Amino acid sequence: MVAVNRQSKMLAFINSRVRVTIVDGRHIVGRFLAFDRHMNLVLADAEEFRRLKKKKTSDTNDDNESLNNGEDVRRVLGFVLLRGEEVVSLAIEGPPVRVKKIKPLQAAADGGGGGIPLGAGVARPAGRGAPMPGMMPSSGAAAAVGQPLAGGPPPGMMMPPPGFRPGMGPPTQ
C-alpha cells in the first residue's frame, strides 16, 4: 500500500477554489496558492463572508424568523495570508483553475504582445570585458596601433613573475 502524506494531498488542491472557515466563524473563499507545515494558507482573489446577527424586535419565536436570523456580509480582500492557527476547516469549492498559455507565434499572429514584435532579438555586448569574436578592429587598424594581429594576450602577460623558479619538467620514462 502506498503511503500518502498530508502535503501530497494538499498539493492536489493548489489553484482550486476553496472555502476556509476560521476560528471566529468567518468564511474566506479564494484561489488556494500555497501552504506550509504550519497550515498557513495563501489565497488569491479572496472574499470574506460573515453573518451579522439581527436583533430581535418581537418576542415571538417563529421558525421562519429563526432561519433568517442573520444577514451575510461580503467583503473583497484580494491576496491573503491566513495564519494556520486560525484555520478551522478547508473545503474545496471548485476545480483547479486552468490558465491558458499563449504561444509566441500565436500571439504575434493575433497582434498580441502589447505592440512589441516577437522574434529573435539582436545581441550586443554591454561594453564590459573582452570583445566578442568578430568585433575586433580590422587587421590594418590593429597594426597601426601596435596590437598583435592574433588577438591573444599582451606580450608580457604570459611571463612568470621575477624570481620565480620553473617547476618540474615533463615526466621521463
Image (cartoon, rainbow, N blue to C red):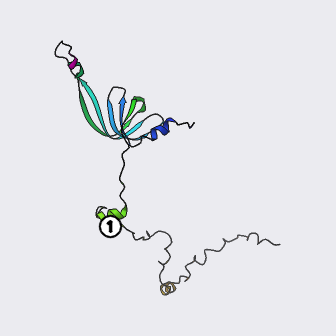
Classify residue 120 by image quadrant: bottom left
Q: Is residue 66 left or right of residue 100?
A: left
Q: Nearer the viewer, residue 137 or 61?
A: 61
Residue drawn at x 24%, y 25% is 52
Determine if the magenta segment contains residue 75: no
Q: Position of residue 55 (x, y in %)?
A: 20, 19
Classify residue 79 by image quadrant: top left
Q: Position of residue 3 (x, y in %)?
A: 55, 36
Q: Is residue 166 left or right of residue 136?
A: right
- Where the N terminus falls, by quadrant? top right
Instruction: Tell me the amino acid under the disc marked 1.
Output: Pro
Q: Nearer the viewer, residue 102 or 56?
A: 102
Element type at marker 1? loop
Q: Position of residue 48 (x, y in %)?
A: 29, 34
State whether the magenta stretch is mostly helix, strand or loop: loop
Question: Relative to residue 124, is residue 10 depicted above or below?
Answer: above
Q: Is residue 138 left or right of residue 89?
A: right
Q: Position of residue 49 (x, y in %)?
A: 28, 32
Provide the residue designation for mark 1: 117
- Where the C terminus falls, by quadrant? bottom right
Residue drawn at x 25%, y 33% is 74
Question: Relative to residue 14, is residue 118 depicted above or below?
Answer: below
Question: Relative to residue 128, is residue 7 depicted above or below?
Answer: above
Q: Is residue 108 left or right of residue 34?
A: left
Q: Which residues are magenta?
A: 55-64
